[in-house]
Amino acid sequence: MANSSYRTVYAFAREMHPKTVKEDILYGTAGFRAKASTLGYVMYRMGLLAVLRARYKRAAIGVMITASHNPEPDNGVKLVDPMGEMLEQSWEKWATKFANVGDDQLEETINEIIKEYDIPMTDRVEIVVGKDTRPSSPSLSKSVMDGVLALSGKPVDYGIVTTPQLHYFVACKNTKRVYGEPTEEGYYAKLTGAFKKLRGETYTNGKYRNRLLYDGANGVGAKKIKYFQELLGNRLKIEMFNDAIIGSGKLNHLCGADHVKSQQKFPTGVPVESGVRCCSVDGDADRLIYYYMEENNFHLMDGDRMATLIASYLKEVLEKTGIELDLGLVQTAYANGASTDYIAKKLRVPVACVSTGVKHLHHKALDYDIGVYFEANGHGTVVFSKNAKDKLKETANDSSVAGERRTAAETLLNLIDLINETVGDAISDMLLIETILHAKGWDIQEWERAYTDLPNRLMKVTVEDRTVITTTDAERRCVTPESLQPEIDALVAKYKRGRSFVRASGTEDIVRVYAEASTREEADQLAVEVAKKVHELAGGTGNPPEI
Ligand code: G16
């Protein structure tokens, strides 16, 4: 195709969204993240890229404005592909290129991508736009829409929604509503409908009680849970905390899933009641963490715990259907060693380890008929293959099949409706966990009894340039700086059941350190020792790290 002129794109860029930052920015673990004040031009350009992607895929594409677990002054953007999955990795380089070229090179870059993919530039494609509750989100959303309009795309503004809701809307639009109605009401109806079918009219069961304390992280997860409170009523009594008004500066502050998981502490704002089940979501409600307090001890039920509970339950129900399907579980290096042992040895479910980022886990999970994936930080879901869905429907509808097998197949079909297969969804995951605990008649203590976590510690180290840290083997080994891995190996060797790794964060300007060992003191000690080595060998800034 001959080069075309996209002068409006440049005019808009120059007049309204000029590139203000010289340093390059990278499409990281979950898109771009930075101080909100620096992101206007990046958003505009992601609006442009979304239109190009949508025309190439001949489908609606999503753009979510959020910095999820980051502090309130940050913001970010993630692109969502047609089936609701994260942007295909081969296009991340284009996102990075679009974000970093000069304003006057935008036209040329657009022509370059059109040529490479032979993109038809006539379709009036829909770009589905959503945003979290950050005060900076409305103006950044406007920048995205300007980008969409500059290339004659059609922005569809969903306003304030959770990240997983946006993924769901995109999937609904591109499956001609087979996945559900592309509206907030459609989303609530799908999830609560499945929940009611699965739980029936018994609200409690055995040790299970239908009361849950919920930390909304002062974000969109607090706003949206209200619909579930209304629709579920006494079926699940959700008591919500941390719903500060927009712009209070309290988003994710001392609360939310990331705080609870990384600090291994109760969030602020949630009353401490001994033995009572609590959960926290993060700033855009795509991560979930459970916990409780007993005799002044804090107990954390993280992504590994959710993955094992879900996989064991799915395995149990699947066996009852009599259908042969592959069930597998995907984790990252952050998974607690005890959980991996439990999955492989007790559950006897195949387990894979991939790099951090839901995009990697999701991709790997698609290798199985039923792929359960969770990051330890509480980000995860389950995906079901077409083969699995077809076989389950066949069994559920076959009147010659024994009743017990048919009921089990129906249960799995309802579970599929309860699960947001497009991406980790804190609210859908919460309803799933509640359903499983209810079915098993378990309280949170019983759930915890499956295995004992190895004590672990997460730390952050600030360095001059975090890209000096590169890794291999699903981030379990450090490649550069070259002298670092031998030092880590030597430190780990001193501790019983010791394990540690380091990696550059893709969402914050820091290096993350993970350590586990057989006792709390040793895990803390190992984490500090490794963090100090990172500080020393990778250009640390500020004071050397301490617990
Ligand atoms: C994002 C990603 C997650 C990842 C997390 C932390 O979460 O979606 O997959 O685990 O960032 O990534 P990193 O360690 O590279 O900073 P969220 O909830 O912030 O979107």
Image (cartoon, rainbow, N blue to C red):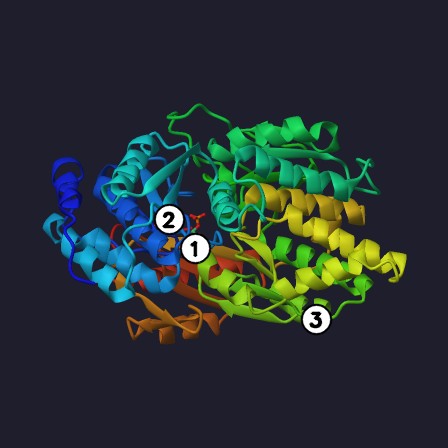
**Residue 36 percent across, percent down from the top left:** 28, 38
Tell me if mark 3 has few (under 14), some (14-19) or many (20+) residues whose alpha carbon lies within 10 angstroms of its own: some
> Tag 3 or tag 2, which sits nearer the N-term?
2
For image coordinates 69% across by 55% down, the residue present is: 309
Which mark's residue is nearer the viewer, 2 or 3?
Answer: 2
- Give the structural element (helix, strand or loop) at label 3: loop
**Residue 525 percent across, percent down from the top left:** 46, 59
Residues under numbered marks 2 and 1 in contact, where contact means CB atoms less than 8 Å apart: yes
Amino acid type shown at disc 2 = Lys
On screen, residue 191 versus residue 446, left or right, reads left
> Tag 1 or tag 2, which sits nearer the N-term?
2
Residue denoted by label 2: 78
Q: Nearer the viewer, residue 162 or 11?
A: 11
Tell me if mark 1 has few (under 14), some (14-19) or many (20+) residues whose alpha carbon lies within 10 angstroms of its own: many
Asked if disc 2 is less than 8 Å from ligand 1, the answer is: yes
Q: CA distance from mark 1 to mark 3?
A: 30 Å
On screen, residue 67 versus residue 371, left or right, reads left
Q: CA distance from mark 2 to mark 3?
A: 35 Å
Residue denoted by label 3: 348
Asked if disc 1 is less than 8 Å from ligand 1, the answer is: yes
